[in-house]
Image (cartoon, grey):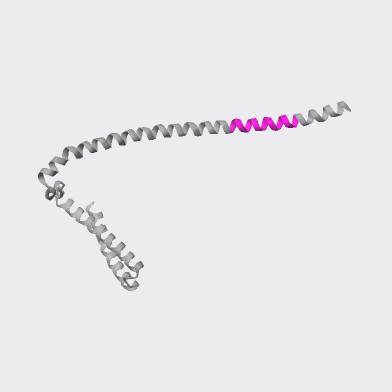
Amino acid sequence: MACADVAALRSASEAEMDALFAVQGELRVRGVAADGVVRRAGEEVDALERRLQDVTVAAYALEAWVAANRATVAAHGDAQAGAAVQPADALSVQRLECAAMDLALEDSMYALDEAVQGGAVPFSGYLRSVRALAREQFFQRALWTKLC
């Protein structure tokens, strides 16, 4: 009877050991995967810290530039602030006007969309207006494509 009990315990313990070995193998695989995740997270943290340093340096440089140019703007006034950047040639002026017109048409269509949602504009009028604006925007974008 003792031999039968030992044999039963042996088979039960062997089954348990096999299950534990399987768990151990799975834990090793998961440990390797977890190590990879931790390593990649550390690399990402390092990259983000480098990027933060770059952005901080750029922010300090921008603040220094603003401080240096604040006196110039104050001396010349806000009237010349718009004249600080001028297009180099007639083609650049035309591109700038074309881009401004495209954005203005986009804003108009957005305002019409909100107006029709609010019930201020009838839907048929909205469709006519958007069709006309979209046509003009198409021509502006075609001109922009030719200019660039």
x, y (%) of residue 55?
31, 36
Q: Residue at coordinates 37% horizontally, 33% vertically from top-left? A: 49
Q: Is residue 116 above or below residue 21?
A: below
The residue closer to the viewer here, 79 or 140, is 79
Pick whichever, 114 or 30, lies toward us: 114
Q: Is residue 1 above or below residue 95?
A: above
Q: Is residue 24 covered in magenta? A: yes
Left or right: where does residue 50 sit relative to residue 97?
right
Residue 105 occupies quadrant: bottom left
Residue 135 x %, y %: 28, 65
Asked whether, in this view, residue 5 is left or right of residue 97, the answer is: right
Would residue 115 be found to the left or right of residue 14 on screen? left
Residue 39, above or below 69: above
Q: Is residue 136 above or below residue 83?
A: below
Residue 89: image x %, image y %? 14, 49
Percent position of residue 23, x then y: 65, 33
The part of the image, by quadrant, that contains residue 28 is top right
Q: In front here: 136 or 117?
A: 117
Which residue is located at x 25 percent, y 59 percent?
A: 104
Image quadrant in which you'd find residue 146 = bottom left
Magenta portion: prevailing SS class: helix
Q: Which residues are magenta?
A: 14-29
| Quadrant for the N terminus in the image | top right
The residue shown at (14%, 40%) is 71
